Amino acid sequence: MPTSGVTNRKMKEILRLYHEANLSMHQIAKSLNLSSGVVCKYLKKAELEGIKWPLPEHIKTDHDLEAVLKSKSSQSVEEVDFSKTSIELKRKGVTLCLLWEEYTQSGLTTLSYSQFCRRYRTWKSKQPISMRQTHIAGDKVFIDYSGMTFDVIDPETSEIRAAQIFIGVLGASSYTYAEATWTQQLDDWISSHVRMFEFFGGVPNLLVPDNLKSAVHKACKYDPDINPSYAELVMHYNTAVLPARPYKPKDKAKAEAGVQLVQRWILARLRNETFMGLDELNLAIRKCLKVLNSKPFKKQPGSRLEVFMTLEQSALKPLPKTRFEFKHYKQAKVNIDYHIELMGHYYSVPYRYIGERVDIWYNHVIVEAFYNGQRISIHQRANLHDKHTTLPEHMPKSHQAQAKWSKERFINWAKSIGTYTTMVIEQRFEQKQHEEQAFRSCLGILNLAKSYSNQRLEAACHYAYMRNICSRKSIVSILEKGIDQQPVLEAPLLQKTLTHENIRGAHYYH
């Protein structure tokens, strides 16, 4: 077994065999029963001191040689700045082997590669958890909400509300972003991301959020289900999501550290101040962020801002040309009247998609429908309940083009049940601008015969028509309460000018 013990004689022999006998380091180590690392170390030390073979004149004794080669120089292992090594490792493609080669060539260390790696691991194990992980520049941003809220006066109500604090921390530089929002709901969550990217001036490769419901529908260790609106944001900014695993705090150590810093350095400092609205609070948070990011690190050189500017900013992906606009998402089935329902209002799509399931993306301005990723309709958002927004180009060119459903078919179906059922169905068509808009309501009324029988539906339509309450909701109520089975006096027909589904009359409440 090779030994690391080196006598004065072996020191001389290392120099002689290398310079005079021209042996390799491996051959010298085998000849003197030493490790290759030890031979390399002493040869590099001798080279730094300018010692070759034969020995220079100022090395007169073995003791002189030992004093020079075994002395601790300014480039000794204890003085290797591993904090700088840790920062360099955050650059893409940089490895410990590359850094060791650079250090040895420039004389910054005499350690063998294995010793260098071992010393670096020892130094790294003594760092805080968030600093032990090696994060590549521009790779990840860790995202979370502070558990601590901040009281703000709502300018609209003058009441005190608890504002939520959104926090994002870049992995390599620990450069921190924070802002206040009223909620942690999806629209606030996504808007905070947009402002965070603009604060950084770029986009990292990965977003690492906690398992917040606004980001992750279903928390799972292996295959988390990402919210569709959040997925659209991710696609727009050409990044990806890697949610922290449930019950794995090390996955989001940077976020946890960022939360603590924001709570101590920002929220605690602002605790005695009063803010009217989120804008005032966020302005104060921005000023505190500038101080926090410029504050020097305790255990490594520089500050968050310095490391961000020199290392991470250039590694971020550029922002897209357009700002992301938040939209809600839902799925809907196209009904027989070629309309989709959104919050009580009906929007048309091309009639050929009847019966298909479509994706709806909407905000307070527009409503868009997509089928298999292709947009098939776009409308301005309307908030009128039980009304239709219909584009002429979505309608069939003729009833023959939609032979399955037509006004005539509904009328004939109603005639098979009874006279008053027919009158109710005809009234439903009269009240709509386009006959297709009545299809959904008529189908709902006629299908009641399957649950209550033709006789009861006819009786309920008789009662409803005589009192001008012909909506499906009214007829369902009559059937559920059994009013159609009670003997009642005939009510006089109302004049045509007063015919409207919302005019019920006093008899409705009998």
Image (tube, rainbow, N blue to C red):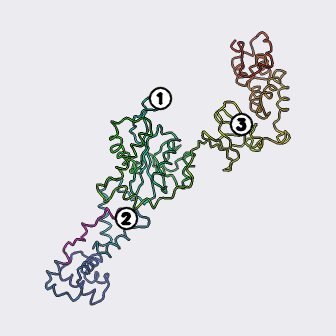
User: Residue at the spot x=44%, y=59% of the render?
Assistant: 313
Number of residue marks: 3
Between tags 2 and 3, which lies in front? 3
Q: Is residue 131 depicted above or below 99 in this figure?
A: above
**Which residue, given by chain and number where applicable, does mark 2 sit on?**
88
Q: Residues within 10 Å of mark 2 (few under 14, many from 20)?
A: some
Whether residue 247 is visible, yes or no, is no
- Residue hosting label 3: 389
Query: Which amino acid type is shown beneath numbered disc 2?
Result: Glu
Most foreground residue, 167 or 240: 167
| Range of magenta residues | 68-86
Q: Earlier in the sequence, mark 2 or mark 3?
A: 2
Q: Position of residue 201 (x, y in %)?
A: 47, 55
- Marks 2 and 3, how far apart at CA: 60 Å
What quarter of the picture does the N terminus occupy? bottom left
Seen in the image, is 125 located left or right of residue 202?
left
In the picture, measured across the screen, residue 48 lies left or right of residue 463, that is left
